[in-house]
Structure formats: C-alpha cells, structure tokens
Image (tube, rainbow, N blue to C red):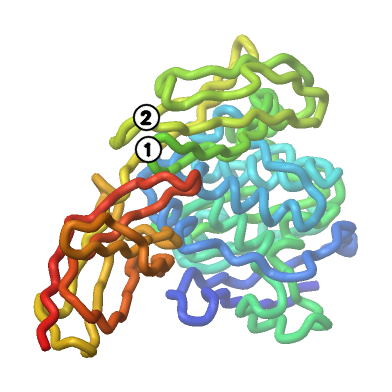
Amino acid sequence: MRRSLRLALVAAAGAPLIATFGPAIPLSAAVPHTVTIADPSSNTAPSQSFIAACDGMPASPAASQACDGVAIPEFNSARAKEGLGPIVLPDDFDTLTVPAQVLAITDVERVDRGLPPVLGLSGYLDGLAQQGADAHGHPPFPSPFGPGRAEAEVNWAGTDSALLGAFMWMYWDGPGSGNSACQSPDDELCWGHRHTILTDYASPIVMGAGVAPGSLAAEVVGGDTADPVDVAPAWAEISGTLTYGVSPVNVTFATDVATSKRATVTATSSGGSGHLDVGFQSGAPTWSVSPNSCDLVASGSCQVVVTFAPAAAGRYPGVLTFTDGTIVKTVALAGIGFTPQVELRVNAGRVTRGHKLVIHGVVTASPTDAALSHRHVVLQTKSGGGSWHAIDSATTGGRGKVTYRLHPARSAKYRLEVIGVDGGVQASSGAVKVRVTR
C-alpha cells in the first residue's frame, strides 16, 4: 500500500522560509507500520542561528563541528520536552560523510527511545536516496518491492545538513509546522517524517541516504534481507565511538570588569561509566572551573560550573577540556570584559529661568561600544563652589539611554554617574555647565 504525503515546512510568522519537505511516503508489502513512540505535544522550530550555522555549510570537520555547537542545544531542548536527556553524538561524527551522519543521528534518536538501530547503509539504497536528493524530491522505492523487503519509508528535506534535516523531521513536523497534510491534530499524516525515523520496523533494518546542494533524502527499509550493509561505516562501528558528550560546546560571556558570570556545562554518558578530568587548554585564570573532575555513571551525567571573571577590559578566548584519559571533549570559551562609559548631552547650554532643560545620557561598554541596558544612572549637580549632590536617577533602556527633564532656577554644572550592583561608581561623565538667564 502506498500513501502520498505532501509536506511543506516554513519558519514562524515573519521569519524567512526555512525548507520545503518532500513527501514522507510509507510503503508496506506485508507488515503494517507500528509507531510506539508518542509524538511531541507541539512543534519545535529550528532557530535562524541553527539554520545559518548548518544549512549549506562547507564539507569539512571544522564546519560540521561549528554546526554541532548550535544544533546540540536545540536538540537537547526539544528532547527534554519528551523526557529525554542530552543527545550524545558519536566521537567521529564530524568526520563522517553526510549520509553516514544521517545514519548516525537516526540511530541515536532510535536507540535513545529503546528502538532497535538501523544496521547500516546499503549501496543500492544509497543510490535510490541519491536519486531523490538530485531531483530535490523523495527517492524511489526498491523495485521490485517483494521478497526480502517488508516495509519502507522515505523522507526528503530542502537542506544539505544531516542535523538540520533530522531536527525538522523529528521535531517540526506536526500541526502548525506548515505540513499541508497535517492541518489538525487528527490528520492521519501528522508527524509523518518523524514516523519514518521512529517506526518499529521488522528486523533487519537497512537504510540509504543521499545529499545534493540544498537537498537531503533518506530511505529506510524494514525486514530487509535483500540489501546488504555494504557501505562503511556500519552502525556497529559508529556506535563504538559513542563515549560521552558535553553541552553546551560554546560558552560566550560579556560582563563588567571585576564582576563574573557563570555557566553550567554537563557531561553525559552514552552508556558507560568513568572518571572525567576537567581543565583548561587555554583561558585560565580569567576562566575557572569547579569542580575540576566529575564521575559519570552509566547513562548518567555530571556537571561543572565554568566562571568568567575579567580583571581588565579586553577579549578572553579559552578552551575547557574534559578527558576520560583517552577521549578529549572541548568547550570553546569566548569572553569580553568591559568597563561602562557614560556620555552626557544637554539640549542647550543656556536656558531662561523656569524653562525646560533636557539632559540625555548614553551608557555604553568599552571597548565594544555596545549599549548597556538596565544600568542605574544618577544625575548630579553643583553650583558655585558647592559639592556634587544627586538630584535624580534613572535606569537605562534597551539602547543604553536615560533622559532627565529639569526647570533649573540658577546656573549649575551637571554630570552623570553609573552605579554598579555593589553601590560603587563604575563610570562618570564629564561635567557640563548650563547657564540660566532671567
């Protein structure tokens, strides 16, 4: 039996088009399809950062690793909604071909849900999937589809990224996703692409995958004794490199000098247990970590806290490392330490007594010149030989700005001070004198 499914997925309202998904078509010769894993209660769309990092990326381990850094947190967030822990990719994931990456991510998602894995890629099925990828549509089924093949399903996505394609197939495939065959939760073909990945196929399970610029296709065949696993590496080899993963793989901070920011980094076991040592390849002492080791139990996780505490303004890159003595995992660190600076401007250097004086302040970060919001700014004044005293205060908005409106009675000087969370002065503006005339 063959059913046709047209599926188009687009971004959230106001966002650019993400991808068009081709038909997810199931074909069953003997055994009905069984999906034992519940569908998500709602869609999770990939962010524009995810798309930018992964779609159309160069075919290199460095580019693949950069994609991982953005994709893994989004997978983790989507999986958490289903009660699953963080995803652990094979250690050699970034050196695999895109078809092998499709196999790897398919099996990670299956095995983590208690389903048997796809054994590997078949050269024959790869060829069929490649036909779909080249045509920017779903691949053809094996022909004849008879003895030795019980059931099959195919997916297509308008991306050449294994992680982005798999994410949209798995987590952005239901009502509200743009699936034209899924207008309401009761429509039969909702989450059809996800079902291609998570169907409880008859054993053995074999697949094919193909990629072309802007095009990704996959074909899964259950009860398949006709198509040998003859494309390396097979899942048994890939799964042998599954040890542990760390998340996030990028930590980025910007903070005031003499203050600090902290992030939790989680190490997750893929099934084994062991001791991990944690330290720095670079970045200390501006970056620190506690504790400097953690112990993993089978299929469990452990956490460390990394702290960024700049003593002076500047940029502070670093690399945090985890190692079990053999496998090293890294977290890229990027920190900016800055000092606030505040500029004061007046609408006039001379006003008539009783008329309005407008004072503007802008708080920015040095050396980045980024606007600093939510900063406490005090307006001070003094006249003659007196001392400075506060007459008003405000909090900067999203563009780092504050505005004061006065009706001064006499000539005076004005200045602004930025106050830190400890109550100390972080920055002062220059003084501006305003003359008041009768």
Residue type highlighted by circle 1:
Val
Query: Could you say where residue 78 lies in the image, as x and y percent from the top left?
Result: 69, 56
Q: Which residue is most to the front?
A: 385
Q: CA distance from mark 2 to mark 1?
A: 5 Å
Q: Secondary structure at mark 2?
A: loop
Query: Could you say where residue 72 lies in the image, as x and y percent from the top left?
Result: 59, 45
Disc 2 crowd, CA 10 A, few/some/many (<14, 14-19, 20+):
some
Sequence order check, earlier mark of 2 and 1: 1
Q: Residue at x 31, y 44 (%)?
A: 339
Placement of the N terminus among the 4 image quadrants: bottom right
In this rendered view, identify the residue nearer to me: 102 or 293: 293
Q: As displayed, is residue 12 above or below residue 319? A: below
Residue 398 is marked as: none
Q: As displayed, is residue 234 above or below residue 50? A: above
Q: Residue at x 49, y 44 (%)?
A: 422
Discs 2, 1 touching: Cβ within 8 Å: yes
Q: Secondary structure at mark 1?
A: loop
From this viewpoint, is residue 73 visible? yes
Residue 257 is marked as: 1
Q: Residue at x 77, y 41 (%)?
A: 117
Query: Could you say where residue 409 lies in the image, as x and y percent from the top left?
Result: 23, 81
In this rendered view, identify the residue nearer to me: 426 or 173: 426
Residue type highlighted by circle 2:
Ala
Residue 311 is marked as: 2
| In the image: residue 219, left or right of residue 357 | right
From this viewpoint, is residue 226 visible? no
Q: As displayed, is residue 214 above or below residue 173? A: above
Q: Residue at x 41, y 23 (%)?
A: 283
In this rendered view, identify the residue nearer to me: 280 or 154: 280
